[in-house]
Image (cartoon, rainbow, N blue to C red):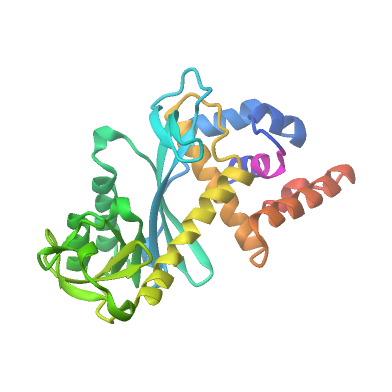
Amino acid sequence: MNQINNYRMALLCTEGKFSCLKAAENIEKVSHDKLTRFLSTLNLNPGIDIESLPKGGIIVIDDTSLSKMYAKSIEGIRWVYCSTLNKAVKGYTVIKIIYVHGNEIYNLEDIIWDKSEGTKNQVVRAKLKEYYAAGLEPELILFDLWYGASETFNILNDFGWKYLCLTKRNRNLNGQRVDSYKYYGGKSLYGKAKGIGHKVQVAKHCKRYIITNLEKPIMSHTGWRLYKERWIIETVFRDLKSFLHFEQCEARTLIAQRNHIQACMDAYLFLKKKNPNKSIEASCRHFLQEFYLRKYTNQDVFALVA
């Protein structure tokens, strides 16, 4: 636990570009070698206790690219598309799965995707099967267009889980493309979609098409309001990259990169719990103020992350 607190402190008290050396100089009592060994030797992903999670939450799934464009030699990096730069860069694709219940966020999984383990959809389906076997009971599963595979829909429906996501305009519903229908009054259409073994409903919002196995009829605006709850994972990615050094790990081993990713999320959840009514940006500023106050008055700075 002390080592975890050390690295959490390193992430939170480092301004600008992060490195173990820079963090150690700021903390003073922790060497950069200790931080580096921590990354390279421990496994920070023991898994979450599914049975302890509250029932009726929302599972949100998405992925992001971690740019390592200036890295010369890091294990497992490959060419990935970076939407920020709008081009392919060297790095990782990280699949994140979170469980949201009220104002609480639980981090279920951070997966550095490896093509040899299957497609991203196959990897996600394997994890969803694990959660179902462990007894997780979500109210709704939200994901974007790229995880909307028919096989995923069928598995979720077999579990008795409800899902909602975007679908492509050329998906076949009752023998026709979904973009060929008229959605009068913003109402949804029911029917059988190609490749899906259960009844679904499709609603149109602007130029987007929403598909779900919810039994309660949805309108254009209600379907979009439900889908917008998926945006929370986008804010998590934004905060991790902007304030918690998500992409700034210089370690060369894959286990170190995984541990850094997990530690960044640990720091994020720590700030959310410490300051539930503040943004992550405001929480980081507040933490830094307390850190420097304690540092220059010779108080125990590690009490902040205990």
* Location of residue 36 (image quadrant): top right
* Location of residue 89 (image quadrant): top left
Residue sitting nearer the eye, 163 or 51: 163
Q: What's the residue at 19%, 58% (across, down)? A: 171
Which residue in the rendered view is the most extreme toward the top?
72
- For the question of whether residue 35 can be seen, the reply is yes
Q: What stretch is highlighted in magenta?
A: 9-15
177 on left or right of 57: left
Residue sitting nearer the eye, 288 or 25: 288
35 on left or right of 152: right
Where does residue 172 sit, x and y in percent of width and height?
15, 61
Residue 113 drawn above or below residue 253: below
Residue 43 drawn above or below residue 19: below
Q: Is the magenta stretch mostly helix, strand or loop?
A: helix
Residue 217 drawn above or below residue 65: below
Residue 27, magenta (yes or no): no
Residue 14, magenta (yes or no): yes
Where does residue 5 sit, x and y in percent of width and height?
63, 45
Residue sitting nearer the eye, 257 or 59: 59
Q: What's the residue at 65%, 59% (across, down)? A: 279
- For the question of whether residue 28 can be seen, the reply is no
Q: What's the residue at 12%, 60% (across, down)? A: 194
Where does residue 25 sit, x and y in percent of width and height?
75, 30
Q: What's the residue at 28%, 81% (across, down)? A: 217
